[in-house]
Amino acid sequence: MKLDILAIGAHPDDIELSCAGTLAKEISKGKKAGILDLTQGELGTRGSKELRAVEAKNAAEILGVSIRENLAMKDGFFINDKEHQLQVIQKIRKYRPDIVLCNAIDDRHIDHGKGSRLVRDACFLSGLRKIETHDENQVQSPWRPRLVLHYIQWKSLTPDIVVDISGFIETKMKSVLAYTSQFYDKNSKEPSTPISSDNFLNSITYRAADLGRIIGVDHAEGFTVERYAAVDSIFDLI
């Protein structure tokens, strides 16, 4: 299956928190999108990796993605080396996305920056013919995404690109709230974490609203780039 967009996150819920509105909007327009989680989030303070897997499946159904896979890398301890790059390359070549969305280039959680660099490097290496990978015992053809965008996470980085997600904030929040173990619940007996507060949950909406305000729409999501983002016509910009 060829995907238009492959969103890759270090942990289940990275995608939902950061670029779910963009995915939902493009899916509504007929694009095929998928999610690849690098780890199972097994070091998370709340819940368990088994519960996170169920939550991730529920979130994927809410968003309507075509596939969701998990590479089961070691949460907190995966690194950007050949072994891990080849795992990501194999999936890029399998799904041949035109656009890859990946972790923030700099963030509070160390896995986010590591995930960003791992995916960026894998996207480049995936286009090299002399790197051999296999899928179902068949040698894969090289594939390099046309565009790699880094979504914004904990830190309020200045975006290079802002996507209008007006009309999709409700879908985004439903996908976030599919992670019942992770986010604010006044009746929860789980330990508190930086992302389990009411303020953090509200921040998802007010960040989207503020980015939307700046570009003159209701809600938006921001992305950074490491290479120039080009348009065919200045009228492609809003």
Image (spheres, rainbow, N blue to C red):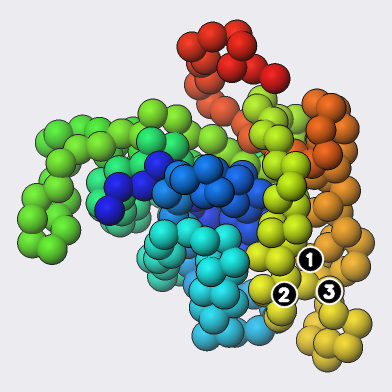
**Quarter-wise, where is residue 59 in the image?**
bottom right
Residue at the front extreme, as displayed: 29
Tag 2: Cα neighbours inside 10 Å, few (<14), some, or many (≥20)? Answer: many
Foreground of the two, 54 or 114? 54
Q: Specify which label sits upstream in the sequence, 2 or 1.
A: 2
Q: Which mark is residue 167?
A: none
Amino acid carrying label 2: it is Gln
Q: Is residue 94 left or right of residue 117?
A: left
Q: Specify which label sits upstream in the sequence, 1 or 3.
A: 3
Residue under numbered circle 2? 182
Q: Are marks 2 and 1 in contact (CB under 8 Å)?
A: yes
Foreground of the two, 135 or 120? 135
Distance between the Cα atoms at labels 1 and 3? 8 Å
Tag 1: Cα neighbours inside 10 Å, few (<14), some, or many (≥20)? Answer: few
Answer yes or no: is residue 102 visible: no
> Could you say whether the residue bearing mark 2 is in a helix, strand or loop?
loop
Amino acid carrying label 1: it is Ile
Quadrant the C terminus occupies:
top right
Amino acid carrying label 3: it is Tyr
Q: Which mark is residue 184?
A: 3
Q: Is residue 58 left or right of residue 146?
A: right
Residue 148 point in image, percent of width and height: 47, 34
**Quarter-wise, where is residue 46 in the image?**
bottom right
> Could you say whether the residue bearing mark 3 is in a helix, strand or loop?
loop
Residue under numbered circle 1? 195
Distance between the Cα atoms at labels 2 and 1? 7 Å
Image point 16% across, 58% down: which residue?
135
> Which callout, 1 or 3, points to the residue nearer the camera?
3
Image point 71% across, 80% down: which residue?
181
